[in-house]
């Protein structure tokens, strides 16, 4: 049986505490997850970025190899892809 995606597992384990997510383009920000769930191997989470009023959603790709981050702002009609999450770490207390 395949393993859980390690980035998704880290996000789930840190939540509900703030988590610093680093994307494949090298950018990073701190997020607070309202919910994180595994459905078998599939991962889904919803939350917010601490410096943004938009909603954020994380899901694993079909092959379970990547976690992707989507964003929907208050004035947006649809979700847009922000990028692939490559790292997840507990945010320092001073950061949030």
Image: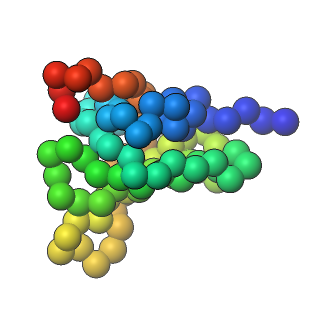
Residue 28, relative to residue 56: is it above or below? Answer: above
Q: Quadrant of residue 24?
A: top left
Q: Position of residue 13 (x, y in %)?
A: 52, 31
Q: Nearer the viewer, residue 1 or 34?
A: 34
Residue pictured at 52% horizontal, 38% vertical = 12
Is 60 positioned to the left or the right of 46 in the image? right
- The figure's colour scheme reads rainbow
Q: Nearer the viewer, residue 79 or 18?
A: 18
Residue pictured at 58% horizontal, 50% vertical = 37
Q: Position of residue 77 (x, y in %)?
A: 28, 78
Q: Position of residue 94 (x, y in %)?
A: 16, 22
Is 92 positioned to the left or the right of 37 in the image? left
Q: Quadrant of the N terminus?
A: top right
Residue pictured at 32% horizontal, 43% vertical = 32
Q: Quadrant of residue 92?
A: top left
Can see residue 25?
Answer: no
Residue pictured at 36% horizontal, 52% vertical = 47
Q: Quadrant of residue 84?
A: top left
Can see residue 31?
Answer: yes
Q: Position of residue 15 (x, y in %)?
A: 44, 37
Is 34 positioned to the left or the right of 3 in the image? left
Tally the marks. 0
Q: Quadrant of the C terminus?
A: top left
Residue 74, relative to residue 37: is it above or below? Answer: below
Query: Quick one: which residue is furthest to the right in this view?
Result: 1
Query: Quick one: which residue is furthest to the bottom in this view?
Result: 77
């Amino acid at each position: 049986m395949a393993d859980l995606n390690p980035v998704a597992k880290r996000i789930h384990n840190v939540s509900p505490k703030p988590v610093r997510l680093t994307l494949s383009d090298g950018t990073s920000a701190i997020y607070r997850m309202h919910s994180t769930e595994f459905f078998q191997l599939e991962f889904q989470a919803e939350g917010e970025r601490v410096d943004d009023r938009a909603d954020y959603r994380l899901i694993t790709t079909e092959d379970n190899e990547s976690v992707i981050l989507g964003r929907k702002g208050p004035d947006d009609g649809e979700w847009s892809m922000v990028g692939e999450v490559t790292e997840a770490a507990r945010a320092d207390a001073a950061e949030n």
